[in-house]
Image (cartoon, rainbow, N blue to C red):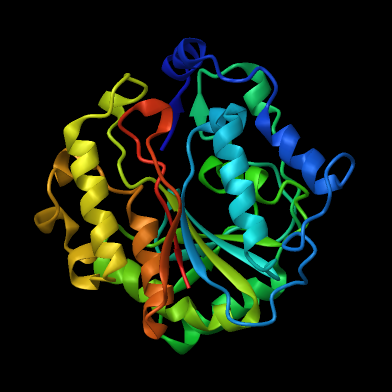
Amino acid sequence: MTISGPKITRRQAIVGLAATPAFAFACKRHSGDTMTTTKSEAAQTAKSRMPVIFAAHGAPVLLDDVVWVQQLYGWAVAMAKPTAILMVSAHWEARPVTLGATTTVPLVYDFYGFPERYYQTTYPSPGAPELADRVRSLCRDNNVPFADDPKRGLDHGAYVPLVAMYPQADVPVLQISMPALDPAELFKLGKILTPLRDEGVLVFGSGFLTHNMRFAFRPGTPAWAREFDDWVTDALARLDVDALLDFQTKAPAAKMALPTWEHYAPLLVSVGAAVTDNPPISFPITGFWMDGAFTKRSVQLG
């Protein structure tokens, strides 16, 4: 999937997003140059079970949105630092489950029409070959076919939230593909990945709970967007797996909220990875991006 830039840049002008990229703030805060290191920031790498998360990832201009970047960064420092991150992005569907690069390779700039500076973003996180071996082993143990694509870098669904959350790029990252847009298969993939949580790995789904490009960057939040956001919030709070899997028939306004549903799909992987221990559910980020139709709602399970 690609994202077109011109509408976004016009909307930026309308809302007056900060001229200085907000991720610079996060980098400065992480560096300790001008900010006091907090207890959370000083926490050691996770030694107990990690939560599972799903984050709304935004377009590349998210990194100019000071408030959203601070929200993402604050969320990251409130969690234990993971030993590695396993990323499932809405922007990579490939059968069978495919493992991306385990070395630092160029990012995938899967959008067009943006100012040149958005194509200069880098995120040189370490590769995660040990995590890749572990994922292969879990797939073998569960008879799940897999493949490798060693030249495939992180797409914007992966690197945009990571730049905000872990701006030092010091946590190894592995991205895997979604094998198909099939709710049961995505949920099963998540369950297969559950053991990684006890190994300090942050299983990270990245998408959007509402994603109708016909309404992108229009001012005003439509009623259907609020209805779907309310419904999915309730279903997640109750961890109603049946409803979450069957959202297309059970959720109000599902066809408006998600005319195509690849951005919802990573949520099902995240839920699958967390459901076995009936985790506490929280929503670290809420609201609607630019007061429009795209909910920023993000979820922590555990």
Task: Say which quadrant the N terminus sits in.
Answer: top left
Q: Does residue 178 sit above or below 2 in this rendering? A: below
Residue 114 x/y as whole percent: 55, 19
Q: Residue furthest bottom?
A: 141
Q: Does residue 205 sit above or below 23 in this rendering? A: below
Choose top left, top right, bottom left or bottom right for residue 26: top right
Residue 32 x/y as whole percent: 87, 47
Q: How many marks?
A: 0
Residue at horizontal 15 percent and vertical 42 percent from the top: 255
In this view, the residue in front, 1 or 214, is 214
In this view, the residue in front, 88 or 287, is 287
Residue at horizontal 39 percent and vertical 58 percent from the top: 266
Residue 139 x/y as whole percent: 48, 80
Q: Residue furthest right?
A: 33
Residue at horizontal 29 percent and vertical 56 percent from the top: 233
In this view, the residue in front, 115 or 180, is 115
Give left or right: position of 249 versus 272. Answer: left
